Image: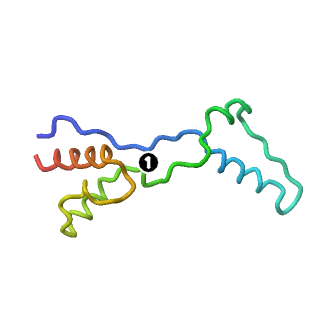
């Protein structure tokens, strides 16, 4: 019986500075336009990251681990790709709970 199972969810942090600048650049592209930001310049300067975090580092990797295991790769932890070891270990622990 599964006693506890971590819930996997995506966090929704502020945009990155690069995303906000790209969005502002789209205002007025076809006709006259303005970009209104609903945050202060202090929030932009101190809270926003310079660039967004890649999706593979934000999403749960449980399905990726299952696919790799189905293809015969048993030591997924040793496979060289972007998610860090703690994220892979958490995914492996969640999948092991399903075996019980």
Residue 50 coordinates in the image, percent (x, y): 62, 45
Answer above or below: position of 70 versus 100. Answer: below
Which of the 4 quarters of the picture holds residue 80? bottom left
List the single residue furthest toward the bottom.
71
Lateral position of residue 83 relative to residue 6, left or right: right
Q: Tag 1, which secondary structure?
A: helix
Residue 8 is left or right of residue 31, and the answer is: left
Residue 86 in the image: state x and y as whole percent: 30, 43
The residue carrying mark 1 is 58
Q: Residue at x 51, y 49 (%)?
A: 53
Check disc 1: other Cα within 10 Å, few if <14, some if 14-19, many if 20+. Answer: some
Q: How many marks?
A: 1
Q: Residue at x 18, y 68 (%)?
A: 72
Residue occupying the point 84% across, 56% down = 28
Residue 28 appears left or right of 71: right
Coloring scheme used: rainbow
Q: Which residue lies at the image location 12% right of the left edge and 50% below the top edge?
A: 99
Q: Position of residue 77 (x, y in %)?
A: 25, 54
Q: Quadrant of residue 43?
A: top right
Position of the N terminus, as image quadrant, is top left
* Observer-nearest of 48 and 85: 85
Residue 92, percent from left and from top: 22, 49
């Amino acid at each position: 019986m599964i006693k506890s199972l971590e819930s996997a969810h995506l966090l929704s942090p502020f945009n990155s500075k690069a995303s906000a600048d790209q969005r502002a650049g789209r205002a007025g592209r076809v006709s006259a336009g303005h970009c209104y930001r609903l945050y202060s310049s202090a929030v932009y300067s101190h809270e926003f990251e310079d660039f967004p975090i890649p999706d593979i580092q934000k999403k749960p990797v449980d399905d990726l681990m299952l696919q790799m295991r189905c293809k015969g790769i048993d030591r997924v932890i040793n496979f060289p790709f972007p998610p860090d070891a703690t994220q892979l270990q958490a995914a492996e622990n969640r999948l092991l709970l399903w075996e019980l």
